[in-house]
Image (cartoon, grey):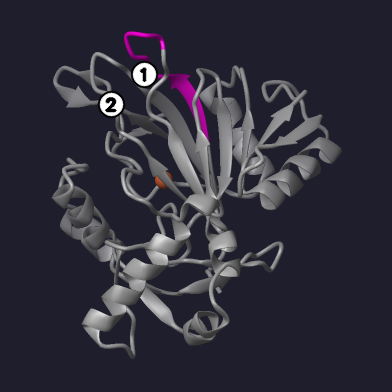
């Protein structure tokens, strides 16, 4: 097994591992260690059926269910289809996933620790270029780069994360076609409070954990000032220095660590360019 860091603020490629085959304990531990060290890891040219992806997810922790079941595989509910493909005029998967900066499901009390995405089909333009890159930003590096007085100001502050606000913000940008949540979903996906700076559950490294659009308030700070602070922190997280851009290839198996990164899916493709990903997630711990 060989680990090649991207040279950016995050990201590494792991070579010499066939994820479809058996993995021993030392390899499993090394993969987890690389994930925490680099925030995002990619294995190229992987042929991983959905059932195997769930096993791989369980090697990193407890396989978690996505917050909405609509596009999950009936016989493998841990696997969510992320796709722009339509059959009989209906989306077969979540088509608007990740189209603004975010960490996955941070609107939950316990957001997932890691997300695994396997590229089954990738969209290609007329010149053979693969579209639909994903940008990853190191929110840990963004925190490190803050001025000491801002770090001090953030100490102990919390922000409200809202599922509905996140998708309203995406819809305003024309990047979401999600149905409004049903009453049961609204109740289950009620806004939650998280620390603006979270410490990584394994490494202890602090990272900014706040996103414009999705974060609607900071208790104790007046609304306009709070929203301005959320905007400023979001800009700092997505500062050019923090970013690694992943160019997908079919067969890529990517894992990222939501406790230290944010990410953004670039939607620069449209049917008949097809994109299909299998997504699973590893259960996390309450951000602290
Ligand atoms: Fe995401």
Which residue shows up at 31% across the image and 43% down it? Answer: 99
Image quadrant in which the C terminus is located: bottom right
Question: Circle 1 sits on which residue?
Answer: 123
Disc 1, SS: loop
274, above or below 118, in the image: above
Q: Secondary structure at mark 2?
A: loop
**Residue 138 is one of the magenta-drawn residues:** no
Residue 79 in view in this figure: no
Query: Label 2 neighbourhood size at 10 Å, few (<14), some (14-19), many (20+)?
Result: many
Residue 126 inside the magenta-drawn segment: yes
Query: Image point 35% across, 44% down: which residue?
Result: 98
In the image, 251: left or right of 273? right
Front residue (pair 41, 148): 148
Q: Which residue is mark 2?
A: 84
The disc at residue 170 is none
Q: Earlier in the sequence, mark 1 or mark 2?
A: 2
Image spot of residue 115 (x, y percent): 52, 44
Residue 164, located in which quarter of the rendered image?
bottom left
Question: What is the quadrant of the N terminus in the image?
Answer: top right
Marks 1/2: CA–CA distance: 10 Å
Residue 24 makes an appearance in the image: yes
Q: Which residues are magenta?
A: 117-128
How dense is the environment of label 1, judged by Cα within 10 Å: few (below 14), some, or many (20 and up)?
many
In the rendered image, the vertical position of residue 192 relative to residue 262, given as above or below: below
What percent of the width, then of the height, locates residue 46?
A: 61, 20
User: Which residue is rendered at x = 56% and y = 59% of the image?
Assistant: 259
Q: Position of residue 229 (x, y in %)?
A: 35, 75
Q: Position of residue 253 (x, y in %)?
A: 57, 29
Mark 1–mark 2 CB contact (< 8 Å): yes
């Amino acid at each position: 097994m060989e680990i090649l860091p991207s040279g950016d603020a995050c990201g590494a490629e792991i070579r010499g591992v066939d994820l479809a085959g058996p993995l021993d304990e030392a390899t499993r531990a090394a993969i987890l260690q690389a994930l925490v060290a680099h925030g995002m890891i990619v294995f190229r040219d992987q042929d991983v059926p959905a059932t195997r992806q769930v096993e791989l997810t369980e090697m990193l922790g407890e396989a978690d269910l996505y917050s909405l079941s609509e596009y999950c595989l009936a016989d493998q509910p841990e696997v969510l289809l992320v796709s722009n493909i339509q059959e009989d005029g209906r989306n077969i998967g979540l088509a608007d996933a990740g189209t603004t900066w975010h960490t996955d499901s941070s609107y939950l009390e316990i957001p997932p620790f890691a997300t695994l995405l396997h590229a089954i089909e990738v969209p290609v333009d007329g010149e053979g270029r693969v579209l639909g890159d994903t940008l990853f930003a190191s929110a840990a590096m963004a925190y490190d780069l803050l001025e000491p007085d801002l770090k001090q100001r953030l100490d102990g502050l919390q922000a409200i994360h809202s599922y509905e606000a996140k998708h309203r913000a995406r819809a305003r940008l024309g990047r979401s076609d999600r149905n409004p949540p049903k009453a049961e979903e609204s109740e289950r996906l009620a806004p939650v409070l998280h620390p603006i700076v979270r410490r990584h559950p394994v490494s202890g490294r602090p990272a900014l954990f706040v996103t414009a659009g999705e974060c609607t308030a900071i208790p104790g700070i007046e609304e306009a000032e709070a929203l301005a602070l959320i905007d400023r922190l979001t800009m700092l997280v997505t500062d050019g220095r923090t970013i690694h851009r992943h160019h997908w290839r079919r067969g890529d198996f990517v894992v990222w660590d939501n406790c230290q990164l944010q990410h953004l899916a670039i939607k620069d493709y449209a049917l008949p360019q097809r994109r299909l990903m299998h997504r699973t997630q590893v259960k996390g711990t309450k951000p602290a």
